[in-house]
Image: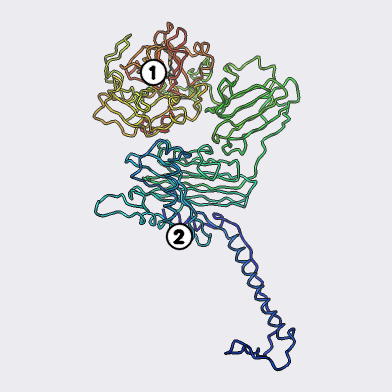
Amino acid sequence: MDKENSDASSKPADLKVSIVCVISIQVVSVPGRLPGRRLPRKPIGKARPKKQSTKRAPFWNFQNKIILFTVFLFILAVIAWTLLWLYISKTESKDAFYFVGMFRITDVEFLPEHRQKESREFLSVARTVQQVVNLVYTTSAFSKFYKQAVVADVSSNNKGGLLVHFWIVFVMPHAKGSIFCEDCVAAILKDSIQTSIINRTSVGSLQGLAVDLDSVVLNDKGCSQYFYADHSSLRYPLEVSATSGQLMCHFKLVAIVGYLIRLTIESVQLEADSCVTDSLTIYDALLPIRSMVLYRLCEPTRALMSFVSTNNLMLVTLKSPYIRRLSGIRAYFEVIPEQKCENTVLVREITSFEGKISSPYYPSYYPPKCKCTWKFQTPLSTLGIALKFHNYAITKKGAKGCEHGWWEINEHMYCGSYMDHQTIFRVPSPLVHIQLRCSSRFSDKPLLVEYGSYNISQLTIKPACDVTHFWQPGPLVCDGFQDCENGQDEHNCTQSIPCTNKTFKCDNDICFKKQNARCDGIVDCPDGSDEDSCSCSRTSSSLHRIVGGADSQEGAWPWQVSLHFVGSAYCGASVISREWLLSAAHCFHGNRLSDPTPWTAHLGMYVQGNAKFVSPVRRIVVHEYYNSQTFDYDIALLQLSIAWPETLKQLIQPICIPPAGQKVHSGEKCWVTGWGQRHEAGNKGSPVLQQAEVELIDQTLCVSTYGIITSRMLCAGVISGKRDACKGDSGGPLSCRRKSDGKWILTGIVSWGHGCGRPNFPGVYTRVSKFVPWIHKYVPSLL
Ligand code: ARG
């Protein structure tokens, strides 16, 4: 760690404050030499001078002139030196060293008012602590460089008393920075706490404050730095890493006024726990103000990503307090000019895509307050504008606001959302006016849109699968994924054709078009080789299913989990491995719900509250394309803090994940289970685990019922409506038993529905077979 820091500090000047001052010192010499005459001696002895008997020499004689001139020169030199010194000390580049720290005051009881920064209680603690810390450092060896201490937060803690979080700032000339001993800063504070050996506790007196010595944390490990960037063509490196101890870094980045900062992250190493302990946060300010967060990273990454500030300031904080393997960041930042985001485009008559528009600062994440306008014009009134959104789609704006971009296209409003494929949007007008407003609170993923003209009259001949005016181009035919709602893209795929690298080959050398034929649950090869050895290793131990009953049998659904939020049942989930659960993204939507700390997972449970095993949740991974307006990509993975023990394997068992792209058959019977409400109008969940048998419903039928049902959703229910999931069952399993081997497959996840159990309104589930690679990305052990 220290090595890294010294490396960082020994980086060329590009890393540090770079105000270069060129000082030219002129040496002034007196012209000629002083004459060798002696000056008249001062009389010694009597105070009263003897009267001069001789005639006085004129005052303005040559000798006096020389003396006066010398005195004048001397004064001039002193003034020049003073001015020079003032100039040097003013313009000398200085480094600010920020330390973050905390300690526990043991004899003050925590009150809720302490949380409020304006409260008397907070202000009184802050004032006392600031005074004490001031006293400690102004009487230390660093008194010259000590600037101030600021109390940032006062919180409660398990050990009692108050936990006080503060910043300490030291400012020193750049040249002296290398002599600054960072460990000494912590040592000074700790050494100032006087503990008594007699009472053998770690609580001592810090200038009269009862402080627990063991609670003192004061650290920056040399990674709290202030960087001033004044060259727009340079890349300023930002690197720090450690393999043990802790990292609490604050990089303050300042660019020349009028410019912005672009931070490019090459890699980040962290413990992935949904930012509970480890995080990398980028702020659009110099202080960690929550409303100014540009982006927050909770997981390690090697993907190149960059972020742009909305001003000439940026703060990057890296928090990794318990390093187990490696924590750190490799990044660089640049000074960039502000970009205008508007354009007028004359589109040619080629009826294909001919150019691109993008979000500001593409390929960087776009900043939160952007606004772009584009005007398109085609040469003929018969040509409209086609827009191809990369991994993004726009849909008509509803009553709610837009989370990922607000679009106005020829006075119609749309909301944007991210997805895993391209979509095409057509505007049947030769003149198109588009406005994009970045509506997310944080920086958001960059957008790329291709544009071109298309023949408006062709609109009547919609592509077979263009239900909502956009479709997924590319290799969608016979890829095992039903993209068109009518399934047309997957028709006629298993007729034997000549073998190429784009065909699937059976063991008996017969080839056909379907690409994902392997283990999709359908026998395509005449010899069945596409479905050989596809079984997953887990089976349910339960053989006692009660068809049509409401209460399930104890132990019948060993993968069923109840997720409790702050102690109350809130959602369901399914066990898929020793430490991972699968649930619905909408259960974790919002600031409080996305934090894993208040959640506990209850496994091996039949009656609510009587779980065989309870574990806190360590990490929540919500699908990055989850759309809270449409419930698309409604899937989340949860990592348990404690893996369930092998000894409970009779009561807790994982359910199998379906093969990627597995097709389901309408009419197939499956089971939905959970502790949710038993009636739509009810307001409390069931104490006993409920089960209901439901039928998988034809996708086209479901689309005609609900409108937007994406290919990531599937519907299940009964025509009468009577059997369904309801509020509180979300995230729970839709379990289907595979006939071929009797294994239970997690076909769906309870997601949404119109009311509960209404006739003709089936339940909507997340289609798990669409997420197999995504699940394997986080849970490789399932492979
Ligand atoms: N969203 C609901 C929940 O939060 C589940 C709704 C399922 N509704 C239905 N009719 N199947 O628990």
- As rendered, which of 287 and 550 lies closer to the eye? 287
The answer to whether the residue labelled 2 contacts the one labelled 1, judged by CB atoms less than 8 Å apart, is no
Q: Residues within 10 Å of mark 1 (few under 14, many from 20)?
A: many
According to the image, label 1 marks what residue?
Answer: 734
**Colouring chosen for the image of the structure:** rainbow
Specify few, some or many for label 2: CA neighbours under 10 Å numbering under 14, 14-19, or 20 or more. some
* Residue 397 position by quadrant: top right
Q: Amino acid at mark 1?
A: Leu
Figure label count: 2
Give the image quarter of residue 442: top right
Q: Position of residue 338 (x, y in %)?
A: 65, 42
N-terminal-most mark, 2 or 1: 2
Label 2 CB sits under 8 Å from any ligand 1 atom: no
Q: Nearer the viewer, mark 2 or mark 1?
A: 2
How far across and how far down the image is residue 591, in percent?
A: 46, 31
Tell me the kind of residue under disc 2: Phe
- Nearest the viewer among 625 and 284 is 284
Residue 10 lies, in percent from the top left, at 50, 58
Determine if the C-beta at disc 1 is less than 8 A from ligand 1.
no
780 relative to 329, above or below: above
Task: Give the percent coordinates (x, y) of residue 692.
Answer: 36, 12
Ligand 1 positioned in quadrant: top left
Q: Nearest the camera: 129 or 169? A: 129
Q: Secondary structure at mark 1?
A: strand
The residues bearing labels 2 and 1 have C-alpha atoms spaced at a distance of 65 Å
Left or right, 577 with reference to 633: left
Q: Quadrant of the C terminus?
A: top left
Q: Name the element at disc 2.
A: loop
The answer to whether 45 is drawn above or below residue 460 in the figure is below
Q: Residue furthest top?
A: 720
Q: Which residue in the protein does label 2 denote?
A: 142
